[in-house]
Image (cartoon, rainbow, N blue to C red):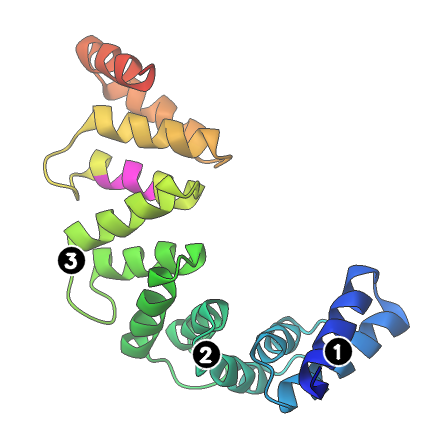
C-alpha cells in the first residue's frame, strides 16, 4: 500500500469515529499528506475541509486548488466541487463556461449534484447555449435516480411551460415524485396547482399517478 492510500485510509478511520477534537485534527493532517502524495479522493476530501473550515482554517483558494488536483484525475465528485467553486466565483475568478463543462462530465458519470446543476445551466443558458430539451433530459435522469431536486425542477418546468406547452398534469406528477423523494417544497407547489387545475386535469393526474 502506497503512502497516499495508507494516509487516506487512516484519515477515513479517524473521521468515522470522530466528532471533533484531536481525532479530527489527525484526520485532516492525514488527508493533507495523502492529497500531497497524489491521492485523488484525499485531495477532494481535504478540499471540502478547507472549503467549509472543518478541522482547518477556511481557505477557499486552497480548496479550489485541491479540487482542481482531484478533478484532473476525472473524479466526478471533485469535478462537481470545482465546478461549484467556478460558478460561484469562490476562491478565484468566476467561470461559468468551464463550470458547465465540469458539471456535464460529472453528470455523465452519474454525479447527482452535477446532474441537477448542469440541467439548471442548460435551462437558463448559463455558461453555454440555452437547451430546454437537454435540461429536461438530465433532470429526468436525475429523477429516475431518486433525486428530489430534479423531480421538483421538472414540475416547475412543466407548470411554467418550459417543457413546451403548460402541462399541469405532468407538473403534478413530478411534484408528487419530488414529494415522495422528500422535497419539502413539493407539497406547497401541489397545493398551488390544485387551485388552478380543472377537475378533468386533477382526475387525469390522479389516474396517471396510480399506474
Query: Looking at the rendering, which quadrant does residue 27 occupy?
Result: bottom right
Residue holding disc 2: 71
Q: Choose the circle earlier in sequence order: 2 or 1.
A: 1
Marker disc for residue 28: 1
Residue that protrudes farthest toward the front in the picture: 1
Query: Which residue shows up at 24% across the image and 41% down it?
Result: 157
Marks 3/1: CA distance? Answer: 41 Å
In the rendered view, does 104 fall on the left or right side of 184? left
Asked if the stretch drawn in magenta spans residue 198, the answer is no
Report the magenta residues as a range: 152-157
* Front residue (pair 150, 159): 150
- Labelled disc at residue 131: 3
Element carrying mark 3:
loop
Res 111 → quadrant:
bottom left
The furthest residue to the right: 22
Camera-nearest label, 3 or 1? 1
Question: Looking at the image, is 194 positioned above or below residue 8?
Answer: above
Q: Where is residue 96 shown, x and y percent of the image?
A: 31, 74
Q: Nearer the viewer, mark 2 or mark 3?
A: 2
- The local crowd at label 1, few if under 14, some if 14 to 19, many if 20 or more residues have their Cα within 10 Å, is many
The answer to whether the residues at label 2 and label 1 have Cβ atoms under 8 Å apart is: no
Amino acid at each position: 500500500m502506497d503512502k497516499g492510500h495508507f494516509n487516506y485510509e487512516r484519515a477515513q478511520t479517524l473521521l468515522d469515529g470522530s466528532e471533533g477534537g484531536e481525532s479530527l485534527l489527525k484526520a485532516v493532517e492525514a488527508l493533507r499528506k495523502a492529497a500531497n502524495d497524489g491521492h485523488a479522493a484525499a485531495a477532494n476530501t481535504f478540499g471540502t475541509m478547507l472549503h467549509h473550515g472543518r478541522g482547518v482554517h477556511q481557505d477557499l483558494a486552497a480548496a479550489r486548488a485541491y479540487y482542481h488536483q482531484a478533478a484532473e484525475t476525472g473524479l466526478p465528485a471533485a469535478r462537481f466541487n470545482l465546478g461549484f467553486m467556478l460558478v460561484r466565483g469562490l476562491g478565484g475568478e468566476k467561470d461559468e463556461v468551464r463550470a458547465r463543462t465540469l458539471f456535464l462530465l460529472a453528470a455523465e458519470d452519474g454525479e447527482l449534484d452535477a446532474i441537477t446543476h448542469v440541467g439548471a445551466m442548460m435551462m437558463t443558458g448559463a455558461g453555454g447555449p440555452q437547451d430546454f430539451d437537454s435540461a429536461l433530459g438530465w433532470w429526468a435522469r436525475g429523477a429516475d435516480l431518486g433525486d428530489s431536486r430534479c423531480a421538483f425542477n421538472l414540475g416547475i418546468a412543466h407548470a411554467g411551460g418550459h417543457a413546451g406547452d403548460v402541462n399541469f398534469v405532468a407538473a403534478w406528477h413530478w411534484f408528487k415524485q419530488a414529494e415522495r423523494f422528500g422535497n419539502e417544497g413539493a407539497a406547497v407547489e401541489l397545493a398551488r396547482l390544485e387551485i388552478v387545475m380543472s377537475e378533468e386535469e386533477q382526475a387525469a393526474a390522479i389516474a396517471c399517478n396510480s399506474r
